[in-house]
Every structure is written in structure tokens, then in C-alpha cells.
Amino acid sequence: MATIGAGERAPALDTTLDDAEGVPHHLQSALQRGPIVLGVYKSSCQASKTMFPFLQRLADRYGAQGLSVFGVSQDSTNVTRSFARRLGLTIPLLIEGDTFPITTAFGVVATPTVFVIDRDGVVTWTTMGFMKPQMNDLGNAVAAALGVTPEPLTTEADADVPMFVPG
């Protein structure tokens, strides 16, 4: 199965997964509040470690406007908690468990893979791996899904972030 792309209906939105703190999150319910960003990751992946502070920035910037940002962890609960702590993440990190329902349904073949899903359940933007120039594209896709004016997601404070990080 190929990775779900822009313009396709997002699968598995009826899925409920617990986050690392044991709180259940139902994706369809989150979508009723507004668009969703799903970031599928593995904590040992350097590209994932580089990507997730940007996903946190999106949640901080647009959460009050209805955006839900979820990390989808391919790791155990303890490893996931450690990942959140090391990176200062407060977004929900959902535990897939041994069945990997999101990874499988979305056809994820590498981490990180990020999807922007609009209120209608359609994927509007996706990327795999980490390339710094695409972070502003991600921010623009989120702003479009929310119907707000986009702001750059990367700033001068990100000068130390590499342009590309292999997964």
C-alpha cells in the first residue's frame, strides 16, 4: 500500500488511541473541532527529533483556533514519555501498540511522516522525513485548513536547525 497523499480521504479516523498518559483520543472527535496534524514517528529517528518541535510550535500557535496536533508513537509508553520530556512536548503522543493501526492505514514507510487533515477528513498536505524548507509549507497548509493568514513556521531562532536530516 502506498502512503496516503494529498487529496485522499484520511483512513482510520474512527480510531481511538491512548496517549502516553493514558488519556484516550478519538480522531474523528478531534476533527469535529477543526483540522488535525498527525505526525507518525519513532523516537530513535533523528529526523523525528528535529520535526517534533515544529509540530509543537503549530499546536502552540493554532491550538486555540481549533487545530489538533498528535504525535503517533511507534514506541512503548515509557520511551514515548521520555521523548516528550527530552523535547519539551505537550502535544498528545498517541501509542500505536503492536498493531500499528495508523502507520498501517496511512501506509507510512518511514518516519517522520506528517499529514494535515482538513475538517472534511481529506489529507491536504503530507511529507516524509525532515527538510527545513518544507516547515513553512506545513505552516501554510495548516493556516489554509484553518482559514487564517499564514505565518512562517521557521524563524531566525532556527538557524541551528539543519536544512535536511536523514531518517
Image (cartoon, rainbow, N blue to C red):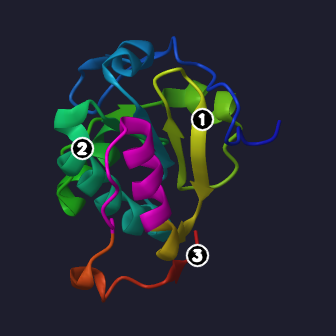
Secondary structure, mark 3, is loop
Q: Residue at x 30, y 35 (%)?
A: 67
Amino acid on which the number 1 mark rests in the picture: Val
Seen as rendered, the residue at the extreme bottom is: 160
Using the numbered discs, state the Cα–Cα distance from disc 1 to disc 3 in whole angstroms: 24 Å
What percent of the width, then of the height, locates residue 13?
A: 53, 18
Q: Residue 123 got which mark? A: 1
Mark sitting earlier along the chain (2/3): 2
Q: Are marks 1 and 2 in contact (CB under 8 Å)?
A: no
Q: Please tell me the numbered disc located at residue 62.
A: 2
Indicate left or right for 81 with 102 as reference: left
- Residue 83 visible in the displayed image: no
Q: In front: mark 1 or mark 3?
A: 1
Looking at the figure, which quarter contains the C terminus?
bottom right
- Specify the amino acid type for callout 3: Pro
Name the N-terminal-most of marks 1 and 3: 1
The residue that label 3 is drawn on is 166
The reply to whether the magenta stretch includes residue 145 is yes
Region of the chain picked out in magenta, as a range: 136-153
Q: Secondary structure at mark 1?
A: strand
Residue sitting at 37 percent across and 39 percent down? 147
Crowd tier of the residue under label 3, counting other residues whose Cα lies within 10 Å: few below 14, some 14–19, many 20 or above: few
For image coordinates 58% across by 40% down, the residue present is: 124
Packing grade of label 2 (10 A; few <14, some 14-19, many >=20) is: some
Choose between 25 and 8: the one closer to the eye: 8
Q: What is the magenta segment's predominant secondary structure?
A: helix
Among the two numbered marks 1 and 2 on one chain, the one whose residue lies closer to the N terminus: 2
In the rendered image, residue 144, in percent from the top left (x then y), is placed at: 44, 44
